[in-house]
Image (spheres, rainbow, N blue to C red):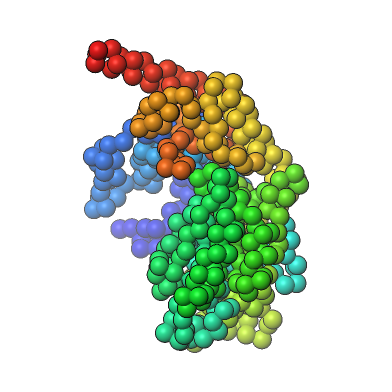
Amino acid sequence: MMKHNSILNLDTDERMDVGTYLLEQINDYLTYIRGVRVSPELSVDAVAEHARRLSFEHPVSAREAINHILEGLKQYQVHTPHPRYFGLFNPRPNFMGIMADTITAAFNPQLAAWSHAPIAVEMENYVLKEIASKFGYLAEAADGTFTTGGAEANLTAVLTALVHRFPSYAKEGLRSLPTHPVMYASAESHHSLVKAARTCGLGTDSLRMIKTDSEMQLDVHALHHQIQVDRAAGYTPFLIFATGGTTGTGAIDPINEMANLAEREQLWLHVDAAYGGAAVFIPELRDLLRGIERADAITFDAHKWMSVPMGAGIYITRHKHILHKTFSITADYMPKEGADLDVIDPFTHSIQWSRRFIGLKVYLSLVTVGWEGYRSILQHQTEMGNRLRRELACSNWKVINDTALPVVCFTDSNTQSTFKSNFASFICQEILRSGLAWISVYEINKVPVLRACITNYDTTEEDIMVLMQLLNEARTKYLEEISERSEQNL
C-alpha cells in the first residue's frame, strides 16, 4: 500500500527523471520553436476533448501527465515565445526568468511577512529601488511593490491617489467624501482603468476619457478644459493618468506637460508605463518619457519589455509612506518575529496578502544580463521595428502610427480606401491561417489597420522578411478575389 507522504512527493530517482525529462522538453521547445505553428487551428470541441482526456478518477504517471500537457500546449495555444509572434506585449521569457519561477515554486517562500522570507523581500526591495532610480526617483524617497500585473498596479494607483487626496477614504470609504471624485486618462489608455474605477467603488462614470491629437497622444488642452468643467459642476478631480506607450499604437502622452498641469491643479499624476517604461533603460529613447520622474507614481511591467515570465507588474512611487497609509493593517495571526526590526511586512504594503516571490525572475535576469545587456536587447528590438517599417515602405504599405517604440500600425492606403470594409481583417486572417506568424487588427480613427509589434529578443531580419512575404501574398490574394467578384457581377 502506498504511503500517504509519497503520493504527492515522488522519490529521489523519480524526481530526477521527471525533472530532467521536463527540462529537456522545455529546451527542445525553445530551441526548435520556429518549427511550431504560431497560431493554432481553433476547435472548441477538440480543445475541450484534449483537456478532459485524462481522468481525475484514474491517475497516470508523472511523465504521461507531462506529455499530455505539453502536447496540448504545443497544439492549442498562440505561441507568444515564437520570434514571429508580432502581437501583444507577451515576449519570449528569458531562460533565467524561467529558472526563477522554478526556484520560487520549489522553495515556495511566503512573502506576506518579512520574517518568513526576509531574503526574498530584500531582493525585491533591491530590484524596486534600482528600477525606481532608472525612472529618476531618489532612492531614499522611492517605494514600491510587485504586483500580479499592470492591472493591479493601476488599481493600486487609484487607491493611493484617493488616500492622498482624501485621507478619510481609507477608513470611511466613499461615503465620507463631500463630492464625487473624478479622474482623467487618454482615450487610448489601457482598459484596466475601467476595472479599477469599478473595483474601488467610484464607478466608470468617474473616469473621464480625454481625446487624443493626431499623434494619438492625450490632448493637454482638452484635459485642462475638462478639469475646469468638472470643478464648475461640483466634482473633485484627484488623479491624472498618463500613458507611456499605449497598447494600440505605442503612443506616449506628453508627460512633462501633464506634470505641469497636475502641479498647477494639485492633482496626483500616475504614469502607466507598463510597456514603454523600459525606454528609460536606453539612453537614446530616454527622452521619450521626459518628465516621468515628476510623476507621483508609475506602473511598469517587467514581463513585457524585460522578457520575464508573466506576471511581474510593478508599482513604484516617490511618496515613501503612501503605500503604508493605503494598505496598513494588523492581524493577530501574522508572524511577529520581525516586530522589533525596522522592516515592512509586504501584506501591509499592497493589495495582496499571501503571494509568491514575484521579483525573483527580475532579480535573476538582472544579475545575469545586467543593465548593459538589457540596453542591447531593447536596442535590437527597436531596430527590428525600424527594419519592418522600411520593408513595409518598400512594398508600398503605409505606416500609420508615429512612435520610436517597435509597435507598427500599417495598411495599404490604396486598397484600404477602395475596399475598406474587410481588407485588414482579411490580411490578418490569412497570416494567422498560415501558422507562420501572428499579427492583429487595431482601429485608428475608426478605421481598422494592421498591427505588428516586436516583442521577442530573438526576432531576426529573416523573421521580418517572412512576415513581409506573407503580407504581400495575402494582399495579392485579396486583390485577386476582389477582381473575380467584380467580373462575376458584370
Name the residue at 47% across, 59% down.
209
Q: Is residue 128 visible?
A: no
Name the residue at 43% across, 38% down.
447
Image quarter for residue 221?
bottom right
Asked if residue 199 lies left or right of residue 54, the reply is right
> Is 197 in front, or is 47?
197
Q: Is residue 473 visible?
A: yes
Image quarter for residue 191?
bottom left
Number of numbered discs visible in the structure rendering = 0
Asked if residue 142 lies left or right of residue 145, the reply is right
Name the residue at 62% across, 41% down.
403
Quarter of the image where the C terminus is located: top left
Residue 474: x percent and y percent? 42, 22
Q: Is residue 120 above or below residue 279?
A: below
Asked if residue 77 lies left or right of residue 330, the reply is left
Q: Is residue 397 above or below residue 105?
A: above
Quarter of the image where the N terminus is located: bottom left
> Is 58 in front, or is 157?
157
Residue 233: x percent and y percent? 46, 75
Asked if residue 446 lies left or right of residue 31, the reply is left
Q: Is residue 105 above or below residue 125?
A: above
Residue 420: x percent and y percent? 39, 31
> Is 113 in front, or is 67?
113
